[in-house]
Structures are given as C-alpha cells and as structure tokens.
Image (tube, rainbow, N blue to C red):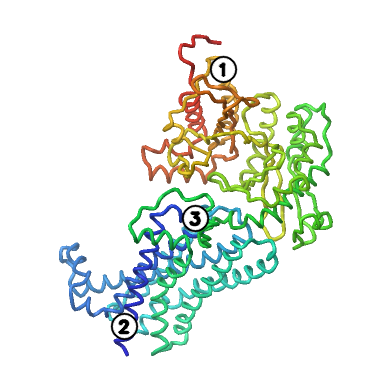
C-alpha cells in the first residue's frame, strides 16, 4: 500500500509539474493571453511548480537523496567542505522545507486574490487589472515571507530529512498558521460565490452570455480548489492517518494538474496550446473580436466582461444622472466674467438625489431598481457652466446631448477601455461630448488644485489646445463603487484616418495592434518616429502653434502635473481648427489630453523603482519630474513633430 501511495503521488506530482510548467510557458510566450484575471492563474501555476518539486522528492523517499548524492554536495562545495555531510544534508532539507512552505502559501494567497478579484469585478469593474495586481503581489510577498520565516524558526531544531507522513502534514500546514490564510480564502470564496449567484439572479436578463459564463467558470474553479484543500485541512486538524491522509496528499499534489485542466478547457488557451505543441509561431493577426470568437472566460478583460451590463443599466444611470444635474443647476448669467467667480464657486459641491420614480423603465426595459435612488455629486457647477458658455454651448443643447432618450444606441453599445488607464468612454450620439471615468485622485487634482487656474487660462487663452472639460461628477449607483466622471469635449471626428498619442517618451510607447489593418490608433511615439512622419509648416504657423502649446504646458508644469500627451489626428480633408503640412497632403489637429496626473509621492516611488531597473535609460519613461517632463514634451513637439518648412526665411 505504501508503494502504491508513493507511486500515485509521484504520478500526480509529475503531471502537475509538467502541466504547471506548460501553462506558465504558454502564458508567457503569447501576449494574446495577457489579460486580467488570466495573470493570477499564471502566477498560481508558477508557484505550483515549486510545490510539485517537493512532492516528487517526497514520493521518491527522502532517503534516496540522503543515502545518495543529493544537493547537500553543492552546499559543501560552496563552503569549501567546512560543513560536514550530516549538517549539509540538514541545511538543504531545511531550505527545501522553507521554500515549499513559501510555495504553498503563495498558491493559497493567489487563490484568495482570485476570489477577491471576482468580488471587485462585481463591485467596481472599472479598476484596471494592472492596479489590482500591484496590491496582490505586495500582499502575496508579505504573506509568503512571513510564513517562511515562521517555518524556519519553528523547525530550527527539527530533522526535516526524515519525516513521517504525520510530520509532513504538520509541515504542510505550517503548524496551523497556514490554515489562517486558508480560512481567509474560505471566507472570500463564500462571499464571492454568494455575490456571484445574487448578481446573476438579479441581472440575469441584462448580463450577456459571456459575463454569465465568466461567473460560472469562476464559481466552478473555486469549488474545485476548495474541495481539494479543504479535505487536506480537515485531515490536519483531526490528525487522520492511513488512506484519508494519503488521499489528502494526493489531492494537494494534483492541484497543479487540475488548474491546467481547467485552463485548457478554454477554447483560446487550448488553440494557443495546440499551436505551441506543433511548434508553430503564434501569428499576431488575431481579429479584434477574438474574445467573442474564442470565448475564453479566464482571459476576458474586466471592463469588457461587464460591458453589456454597463452599456444598459449603469450607462443609463450615468447619462440620466448628469442630465438631471444639468437640468437642476441654476444657470449663470451670460454676462459673467472670470472676475465674477469667488473661491466658494470653485469649492461648491451640489448633491442630487435621483429617485427611482424618475427613471423611465418602460423605455428600454432596464432593471435598475436595486435601490429606490442613486446619488450624483456635481462639482463647481457654475464654473463649468461658464466654461461651456465660453465655447457657445447652451444649457439646452448640452442637456439634449446628454439626455438618455437621445442616446438609445449608446445605451446598448459596447464602450471601450482605451489607453493605459483603462478608463471607460461613453460617446454621445450627436458627437459633441464624451463621458470618461477617472480615478478619485484625478478628480481631486482638478477640483482642489487646478480648476481655478484652468478656468482663468481658458478664459484668457481661447486658442488653448487643452481638451475642454465641461463637468465633474461623482455618481453613486447601488451595487457599484462610486464612479468619478468627467464631461469633456469629443475630440475624435468620424472622417479621421489615423491618430497618435504622443508624450515624448519611447519606453514601451508603441501601438499593440499595428497588425490590424483596420486599426487607426492610438499609435504612439515609437510608431511616429519609425514612420519618419514630419509635419512641415511655415515658420509663422509653427511659432504660433508652439507658443500656444507652451502656455498650456507651462500651466500644467506649475501645478506639478505630468504624463499628459498630445492627441494628433490625421485627416484627408480640411477640418475646423486643422492645419496642413507642406510635406504631406494631409490635415492635422492638435489637443493636449490626460492632464490630471500630479507628480505625487506614489509617482516619485515609481520613478525611482524605474531608475533602478533602467539606469541611464530612465529618460525614456513616461513618469518624470514635471519640469523635466515639460522640457522633454516640448522638445519632442518642436524637434520631431512640428518642423519648419525648408527654405522658409520668413520670421515673425
């Protein structure tokens, strides 16, 4: 019986090892799979590799290593044989035990994060996966280090090289401390399961098939993992022996294989795996709608997974909430000037309680009534009314643009998360406005630090290239975290043939979908430079453009803002406020966008971490001190984008 147990453990451990290595490699070599939450599963597979290594060593019987030539030989060589053989064996066994404890902790921690991630998805699907993973890695590292230190201290007087099965179970659960992490996992798993079922039941008619399947796959995986590890934990607490204990060890050893089996159950991952097996290089010409074609429920970006739901219920609430705020706000006198406004106008926040009775359910058959009302907080309403008036936008025309009744196709369309921020964009059907989600820190930067200076700047510089902001709101919809919103001008025009997002930095600044012929942007700095595109204008025109942008960028620099960019759009025919290039028979428009990121302590930390990683190449990254960012941005604009027409001797 002992032999069959060891053989079975060896087989499943080997299967888990091979499967985990395979899943990790397929994920690593195929950018197609680099979507959240697929990354969490990839990290689980990586830590499963270490677990499987220890399980194989156990199945082969530790004595094979002790009585033969084991890793202790390497330790003796490194110590120049100052450590005797017995001590070296003990040290290597202790190291192996400690690393195994860390691997098990990491596997449990990232499964805990997977459950938490599902809860966050249901609570606020607009938080980007990249932002989440930072915190997962930090907490996972801290938990792993703490468990490894405890294991090393606790076993300082133990001979790990000769363990009974009971001793192995004690080590597996780190004397019970690992059970605390698993207890947290069970709690998160229970909450995520209940929350998922409730949301599916409540929103069954509005959730599209992909979202429902996404929840079902998560629930299935959580149930499988919970069964595997709960059986082992129960055996630890009641000190079971014999077949039950052996079966628990086999289940733990097979967890990597089970994860790989679930992962390959997804069509996209399986197709990629098959191509890798056939040693065919993955072509980077996948259609833009590959998610719908392959239906990979582990690899759907969070914002896309929830798009249908956001496109109906939440989008309606956002549009209607802003519409009601505009309708209820008192209009300012058109004769107002900048000097009319006082500090109170910039600090003013007006809450609007939108009753469920106001919502036109019969219009679209939407099920919004999870609560009798939702809240909309409107910031500095008179200031933004004045800014809209400066651009000849009347209160009536603005309300008509935002009115949900005039945006029927928008309500049920799939919006897009664009750029590195992962913001959600909702375009009004008349093409005038865009509603953009932002971070709370960006809203505070605008309202508390920039708004007064921004208002003055726009008032006295009507030719400013800053993208116009026409409203700031916080919408609190039941079932979702508060959503911070900007109402901005719609810069994109239907006859645009290409557009660029340019910062002056080159580190990882290239388009990810250049292989798609239908892709028109955003192309980035490296793409612009590789195309050798030049915009040649007269010296007079060039000086005028640079002067206006210089004033805009100087304002941002004074308020410690960085990471903004130029939106350069290309057209085949003349547009309003566009200019032509003498070198290319094309028309161009400029705008400065994404200018709400301050150089905070967090950005400083990010900068110095990048400095350690990149060294002398630090000048190529996006995050830089505002003054240096300003200089690089303006130099790139004046030297690489706007060039002076040859043989032009005219000077202003």
Callout 3 crowding tier (Cα within 10 Å): few <14, some 14–19, many ≥20: some
**Quarter assignment of residue 205:** bottom right
According to the picture, the residue beneath numbered tag 1 turns out to be: 541
Q: Nearer the viewer, residue 312 or 235?
A: 312
Q: Which mark is residue 35?
A: 3
Cα gap from disc 2 to disc 1, whole angstroms = 80 Å
User: Earlier along the polypeptide chain: callout 3 or callout 2?
Assistant: 2
Residue 272 vs 234, above or below: the answer is: above
**Quarter assignment of residue 371:** bottom right
Q: Nearer the viewer, residue 238 or 43?
A: 43
According to the picture, the residue beneath numbered tag 2 turns out to be: 6
Q: Which mark is residue 625?
A: none
Examine the rendering and report whether any part of residue 149 can be seen: no
Task: State yes or no: discs 1 and 3 in contact (Cβ < 8 Å).
Answer: no
Cα gap from disc 1 to disc 3, whole angstroms = 44 Å
Callout 1 crowding tier (Cα within 10 Å): few <14, some 14–19, many ≥20: some
Q: Nearer the viewer, mark 2 or mark 1?
A: 1
Residue under the image location 56 percent in, 35 percent down: 560
Examine the rendering and report whether any part of residue 320 can be seen: yes
Query: Circle 2 sits in a helix, a strand or a loop, which is it?
Result: helix
């Amino acid at each position: 019986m002992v032999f069959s147990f060891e053989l079975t453990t060896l087989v499943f451990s080997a299967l888990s090892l091979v499967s985990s290595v395979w899943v990790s490699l397929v994920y690593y070599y195929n950018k197609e799979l680099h979507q959240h939450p697929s990354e969490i599963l990839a990290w689980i597979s990586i830590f499963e590799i270490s677990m499987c290594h220890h399980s194989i060593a156990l199945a082969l019987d530790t004595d094979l290593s002790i009585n033969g030539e084991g890793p202790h030989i390497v330790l003796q060589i490194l110590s120049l044989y100052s450590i005797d053989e017995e001590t070296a064996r003990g040290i290597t066994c202790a190291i192996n035990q400690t690393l195994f404890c860390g691997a098990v902790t990491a596997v449990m921690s990232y499964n805990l994060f997977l459950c938490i991630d599902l809860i966050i998805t249901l609570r606020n699907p607009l938080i980007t996966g990249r932002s989440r993973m930072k915190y997962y890695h930090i907490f996972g590292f801290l938990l792993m280090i703490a468990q490894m230190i405890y294991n090393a201290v606790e076993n300082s007087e133990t001979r790990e090289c000769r363990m009974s099965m009971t001793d192995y179970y004690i080590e597996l659960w780190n004397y019970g401390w690992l059970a605390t992490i698993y207890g947290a996992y069970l709690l998160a798993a229970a909450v995520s399961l209940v929350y998922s079922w409730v949301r599916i039941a409540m929103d069954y008619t509005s959730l599209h098939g992909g979202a429902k399947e996404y929840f079902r796959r998560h629930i299935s995986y959580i149930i499988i993992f919970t069964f595997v590890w709960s059986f082992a934990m129960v055996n630890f607490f009641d000190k079971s022996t014999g077949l039950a204990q052996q079966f628990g060890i086999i289940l733990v050893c097979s967890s990597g294989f089970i994860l790989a089996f679930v992962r390959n159950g997804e069509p996209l991952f399986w197709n990629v795996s098959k191509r890798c097996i056939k040693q065919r290089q993955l072509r980077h010409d996948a259609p833009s709608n590959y998610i719908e074609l392959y239906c990979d429920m582990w690899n759907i970006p969070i914002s896309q997974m929830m798009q249908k739901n956001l496109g109906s219920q939440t989008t309606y609430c956002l549009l209607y909430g802003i519409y009601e705020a505009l309708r209820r706000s008192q209009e300012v006198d058109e004769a107002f000037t900048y000097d009319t406004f006082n500090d109170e106008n910039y600090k003013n926040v007006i809450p609007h309680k939108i009753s469920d009775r106001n919502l036109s359910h019969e219009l679209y058959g939407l099920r919004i009534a999870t609560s009798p009302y939702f809240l909309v907080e409107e910031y500095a309403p008179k200031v933004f009314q004045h800014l809209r008036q400066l651009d000849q936008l009347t209160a009536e025309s603005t309300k008509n643009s935002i009115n949900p009744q005039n945006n029927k196709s928008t309500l049920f369309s799939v919006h897009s998360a664009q750029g590195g921020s992962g913001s959600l964009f909702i375009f009004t059907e008349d093409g005038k406005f865009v509603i953009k989600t932002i971070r709370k820190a960006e809203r505070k930067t605008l309202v508390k630090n920039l708004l007064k200076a921004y208002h003055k700047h726009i008032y006295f510089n009507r030719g400013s290239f800053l993208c116009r902001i026409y409203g700031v709101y916080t919408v609190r919809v039941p079932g979702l975290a508060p959503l911070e919103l900007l109402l901005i001008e719609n810069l994109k025009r239907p006859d645009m043939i290409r557009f660029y997002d340019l910062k002056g930095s080159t580190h990882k600044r290239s388009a990810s979908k250049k292989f798609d012929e239908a892709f028109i942007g955003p192309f980035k700095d490296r793409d612009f430079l590789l195309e050798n595109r030049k915009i040649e204008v007269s010296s007079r025109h060039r000086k005028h453009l640079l002067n206006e942008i210089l004033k805009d960028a100087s304002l941002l620099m004074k308020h410690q803002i960085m990471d903004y960019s130029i939106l350069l759009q290309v057209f085949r025919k003349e547009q309003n406020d566009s200019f032509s290039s003498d070198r290319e028979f094309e028309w161009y428009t400029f705008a400065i966008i994404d200018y709400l990121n301050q150089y905070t302590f967090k950005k400083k930390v990010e900068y110095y971490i990048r400095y350690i990683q990149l060294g002398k190449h630090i000048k190529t990254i996006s995050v830089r001190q505002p003054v240096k960012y300003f200089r690089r941005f303006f130099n790139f604009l004046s030297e690489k984008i706007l060039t002076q027409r040859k043989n032009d001797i005219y000077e202003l």
